[in-house]
Amino acid sequence: MRFLDQAKIYVRSGNGGAGCVSFRREKFIEFGGPDGGNGGRGGDVIAQCVEGLNTLIDYRYQQHFKAKTGGHGMGRNRAGANGADAILKVPVGTQVFDEDNETLLADLTAVGQRAVIAKGGNGGFGNAHFKSSTNRAPRRANPGQPGEERTLWLRLKLIADAGLVGLPNAGKSTLLAAVSAAKPRIADYPFTTLHPQLGVVAIDGREFVLADIPGLIEGAHEGVGLGDRFLGHIERCRVLLHLVDATGTHAGEAYKTVRAELEAYGHGLPDKPEIVALNKADALTADELKRQTTRLERAAGKAPLILSGATGQGVPAVLRALAAVIERSGENIAAATAPADWRP
């Protein structure tokens, strides 16, 4: 299935049904009172998170969604039926933005979560509603209110515990394939990965979700290469795994290039916990590996982990480091959201 993480849609909620003007007409009852019913409410347009989806590709082929109009009121005090809602099924992590693509209307992060993005119009009152002591036979009824019509943007941000960042061809996809059941495309050239990939990683009885995004190059925040549009998929991650290619020219400069793009992008990514790892260690001699490790440690300000995604060397240590940060982050979140002790 093709991956699509942004879609533009047009939605319209249902109009309210019109109220009815009617009077009671029965044998031997000469002056029956008003009995016109109210109109039904128009249907809403609702975005709902569901399982089994990880792309917005369905909204490439259908962009217009309209809820049903409410039923009109009828005589004998019969109210019109409410219009059926239009349900937009979206994957977990979907955000709904207004037409300006900046105003956030809803952020759906859990299965079953729903958000009304266009409210249906109220139904009109029938003439029975306007009966009073001074107006015993009203001949007026309200039309239903019109529904809302708006243009919206859907934007998907994948939900993952850890995110992989690095230059193109740093071995991110190879590592993801080695530690999970994901099957990303792997080849010996840059930009092999064109779309984000997710994999479930297990280590020491613990599991977490690892996200791989296309590689960044210098100037990505200005649209160079594939740009930085995929960085949104790791905004929700608790920790970043920064992979640096040991076979590159200068490991320290490669690290600084990616960090500069993260700083330019912002949105909290530069402040996330980061684990730095030097990949493809099996392709270097001991002296070359030591030289690259020193360069990377000087640039990152901390000793990097050494691994090889192809051979598995050092991979368990990296996964344990990720799991430890994720676990600590979960404990901090739980402590921050725990209710304070009540005291009389």
Image (cartoon, helix red, strand yellow):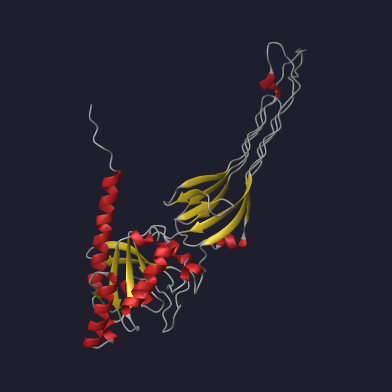
Query: Is residue 108 or residue 180 the one in the foreground?
Result: 108
**At which x and y percent is residue 39?**
66, 32
- Quarter where residue 63 is shown: bottom right
**At which x and y percent is residue 166?**
37, 73
Count of picture labels = 0
Look at the picture and state if 149 lies above or below 8.
Answer: above
Residue 312 visible in rendering: no
Look at the picture and state if 115 lies above or below 64.
Answer: above
Residue 133 visible in rendering: yes
Q: Please state if 60 lies on the left or on the right of 227 as rendered.
A: right
Furthest toward the top, the residue is 133
Q: Residue at x 50, y 68 (%)?
A: 222
Q: Please state if 14 lies on the left or on the right of 238 as rendered.
A: right
Q: Residue at x 59, y 62 (%)?
A: 60
**At which x and y percent is residue 251?**
32, 79
- Quarter where residue 83 is shown: top right
**At which x and y percent is residue 207?**
29, 62
Q: Quarter of the image containing the C terminus? A: top left
Look at the picture and state if 190 lies above or below 30.
Answer: below
Look at the picture and state if 64 lies above or below 45.
Answer: below
